[in-house]
Image: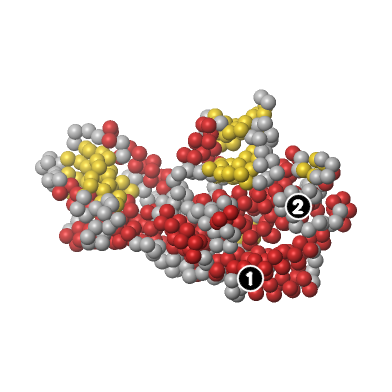
Amino acid sequence: MTDVNGRSSESVPISLVAHTLFCERRTWLETMGERAPHSYAMKVGDSDHRRTHDASTGRSNRIRARDIVDHELGFHGKIDTADVLPSGGLKLTEYKATPVRAQPRVSEAARVQLALQTIALEKEGIHVEEHSVYFTTHHRHVPVVLDESDRAFAIEAVARTHAIISSNQAPAPLVDDSRCEYCSHASICLPDERAESAVSRQIRAADPAGQVLHLSTYGARASLRSGRIVVRYQGEELASVPIEQVNGVVIHGNVDLSAGLQRELLWRDVPLVWCSSSGRVVGWSRSAYSPNGSTRVEQHVASAEGRLGLAREFVSAKIANQATMLRRYVGRTQDAQKLRELQKEASTAPTLGYLFGIEGTAAGLYFGNFDHFLKDRVRDQVGAFPGRNGKGASDPINICLNYAYALLQAEVLRGVVACGLDPHAGFLHSSKRNKPALVLDLMEEFRAPVADSVVIGAFNNGEVAPSRFLNTGTNFRLDDKSRKALITAFERRVETEFTHPIFGYRVSWRRAMEVQARMVLGYLDGSQHRYVGVKVR
């Protein structure tokens, strides 16, 4: 909502104005609800401000954590410390954490913060005489002298912030800027990747801190105890994991979660995915807090209108990776060459229906060679591969493929949800079928190099064997040991690093899935002009 002057009618926090001075795109990300991973510097800052933001520690001549607001200019904030001088005026002090080796220099953002605090207080009739910044790591006060130019600059910074949050399009990322190297939002902004080309420098964005917890022992119960997720079965403790180390939970079959644990995971914005005993994803839950709400609206519009370019790239990348798998296991055959030709054809398909036809032809060629991916002894055990079968699969290979695809779906779902996109609004798969269409879209390029690779490796390495399946007479079913072996193999695969074919740096498959979800987000919010799928060589 905007006022008659085109400015956002909502009040903006002074901290958001400080983001604008650093990078306008970071302001957009903050406004869209994108939470930056907590860095060491942020934790130090929070610790240093704990006392200054505790109003109860103030005294008669010192005020702490005093709220201020300016309804006219549209900003609000909190003063760290205000000392009452003998004259009755105030001395405002901002607390800043700076690395010990860095010089304690007053930044532009600190000057703006002090200027805005002064403007708001003076409108209340409170006189401010002095300003300073206290550098907590250096234990040093640095005086600050403000003039009218500082006030004018601060007011203009507030107006710029309102303009950014009122816009329907994300600001462009910085180009080859040193600020990106130490920005807390680099892992979600991905400034150098937006060009969808090789990255000359890597802003090392760590993979998600923690692990995905798979709960697969039937009849077990997971609960929260003393900050740890404790899993018990028939009175025996199976596992105990600090909740801080968990960034996702996948439940397989009949496993119970306590209400307290579910609530805590939701508070921490940790997604939960429920799967059936056969691996089918039956549902998920996550915090009601979700970033990029306005872009999600654009996603639904784009999904309804159709974006053939996105659909082409999903299918083209899928076929390219199938061709690579065929070349690795069988060699440069005629079918591998045909897949390369279909990959190129998919990138220029005139309609969605035509694209589906190409995808079906490619799948026939790829799975027609799947027998050759397995070692001779495995083929002797499982018999001839009957071809790809999704629902109602009765042979060991298809059962394991279906289970691996479910694990992949849960993993891609986490990446899609992390950046605030709607899992149901897709561009290749139909949203009318009440399935997570966008998740299924993004899965396509990861099916062969991740899920298929896991199943092939598990059989060829002996981690999964037909002799360990439960045979019901006409059908096979994964037993507990095989299911856990497949989960372990999948986790090992998604944690494996590879050289990203577009950006040229090392990244894990798990991180790559979220990166690709963010590339779709960037295409939708205007940060980039195209989407490029992951095509391994």
Picture quarter with the C terminus: bottom right
Q: Nearer the viewer, residue 451 or 305?
A: 305
Horizontal and vertical percent for residue 300? Answer: 47, 58
76 vs 357, left or right, is left
Report helix, strand or loop for mark 2.
helix
Q: Residue at x 75, y 65 (%)?
A: 364
Picture quarter with the N terminus: bottom left
In three-dimensional space, the C-alpha distance between marks 2 and 1, rounded to whole angstroms, equals 27 Å
267 vs 94, left or right, is right
Amino acid, disc 2: Asn
Horizontal and vertical percent for residue 144? Answer: 23, 53
Q: Is residue 133 visible?
A: no
Residue positioned most to the front: 432
Residue under label 2: 398
Residue under label 1: 354
364 vs 318, left or right, is right
Horizontal and vertical percent for residue 95? Answer: 31, 46
* Crowd tier of the residue under label 1, counting other residues whose Cα lies within 10 Å: few below 14, some 14–19, many 20 or above: few
174 vs 15, left or right, is right
Measured along the vertical axis of the image, is residue 65 above or below residue 193?
A: above
Report helix, strand or loop for mark 1.
helix
* Crowd tier of the residue under label 2, counting other residues whose Cα lies within 10 Å: few below 14, some 14–19, many 20 or above: many
Q: Residue at x 51, y 31 (%)?
A: 260
- Which comes before the other along the chain, label 2 or label 1? 1
Q: Nearer the viewer, residue 188 or 183?
A: 188
The quarter holding residue 508 reads: bottom right
